[in-house]
Amino acid sequence: DMTNGTLSNIEQGKVSPSVISLEKILNAFPMSLQEFFSDQLDFSPAVFRRSDMVHIVKDDTEFHILPIKESGQESVYLAQQVYQPGARVKSEWLVKNGFVGGIVIEGELELMLEGVEYHIAAAEGFYFALSRQHAFVNSSKTPCTVVCVSFSQ
């Protein structure tokens, strides 16, 4: 909602933007007016190496977890999970308040959700509340890789 001429004049320093104009410009960026004027911004790196992630091995499943601090939520995670053949992860050791969603990248996975079994193949996904009784099982003969995001409240 700003003309190209007005934006050009601001860029060239010919005019100073009003607060309203500055808010319009910042609508194009993931930044608030307060963040724009803050000198205490903490930008995380854009690239994370495997060594930067939290690594957990539980039974026959390996997790590489990347906390997403800038999400505005306390516990938001992006993770790669590799389920080896025979792996079974039950909800008992997981957080109960929140949601999880994911996409199977390769292989196949079974989701047991409150007594109902779902077969999830590559390029298919899932999403549900963590408070629901669930388990993930890889009953195939090949590893299954899943990329998922979860947040807890």
Image: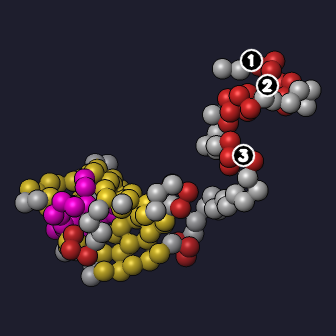
Residue 107 numbered mark, or none:
none
Instruction: Tell me, yes or no, whether the two marked residues, 2 and 1, touch with CB atoms within 8 Å.
Output: yes
Return the x and y of residue 134 as percentages of the image width and height: 17, 64
Q: Specify the quadrant of the image occupied by residue 92.
A: bottom left
Residue found 72% across the figure and 60% down from its top: 40
Look at mark 1 in the image and give the residue it sits on. 3
Return the x and y of residue 95 as percentages of the image width and height: 30, 69
Residue lying furthest right: 14
Residue found 66% across the figure and 20% down from its top: 1
Q: Is residue 99 above or below residue 86?
A: above
Is residue 126 left or right of 19 when viewed as pictured?
left
Is residue 108 left or right of 102 when viewed as pictured?
left
Check if residue 63 falls in the magenta segment: no
Amino acid type indicated by mark 2 = Leu
Residue found 35% across the figure and 80% down from its top: 57
- Of badges 3 and 1, nearer the viewer stands 3
Look at mark 2 in the image and give the residue it sits on. 7
